[in-house]
Amino acid sequence: MKTTEIITAVKILESLPRDSQKKVVDHLQDYIANLKDELYWDQQFENSGEQLAVAARDARERYHAGEAKPMDLSRF
């Protein structure tokens, strides 16, 4: 199903010379890949929001109880 936006994008592409069309499509492919990745991670965070909140509360409680130690970054 073509939306108005897709039809507009095709018309814009068709108005360009062929070599420019290729450049635009290459950029679009990169942009869409990045967008899909962002959407994936947004969904992951949305689905794990409560788990992250519980982990943050636990970390905060441990910190205030004096149970937290500074992370030894040299181990990584």
Image: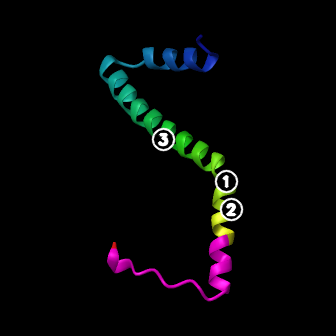
* Location of residue 35 with respect to 23 vertically, above or below: below
Residue 67 shown left or right of residue 20 in the figure: right
Dot 3: what SS? helix
Give the alpha-carbon distance from disc 1 to disc 2, as whole Å: 6 Å
In the picture shown, does residue 28 fall above or below 1?
A: below
Residue range highlighted in magenta: 58-75
User: Going from the N terminus, do you reach mark 3 or mark 2 first?
Assistant: 3
The amino acid marked with disc number 3 is Asp
Q: Which residue corresponds to mark 1?
A: 49
Q: Residues within 10 Å of mark 1 (few under 14, many from 20)?
A: few
Residue for badge 3: 37
Type of amino acid at the residue the image marks with label 2: Ala
Can you tell which of label 3 and label 2 is closer to the viewer?
2
- Disc 3 or 1, which lies upstream in sequence? 3
- Label 1: element kind: helix
Q: Quadrant of residue 52?
A: bottom right
Viewer-proximal residue, 36 or 47?
Answer: 47
Please state the horizontal and vertical placement of residue 1, each as a whole percent of the image.
59, 10
Which of labels 3 and 1 is toward the front?
1
Label 2: which residue?
Answer: 53
Please tell me which residue lies in front, 3 or 24: 3
Q: CA distance from mark 3 to mark 2?
A: 23 Å
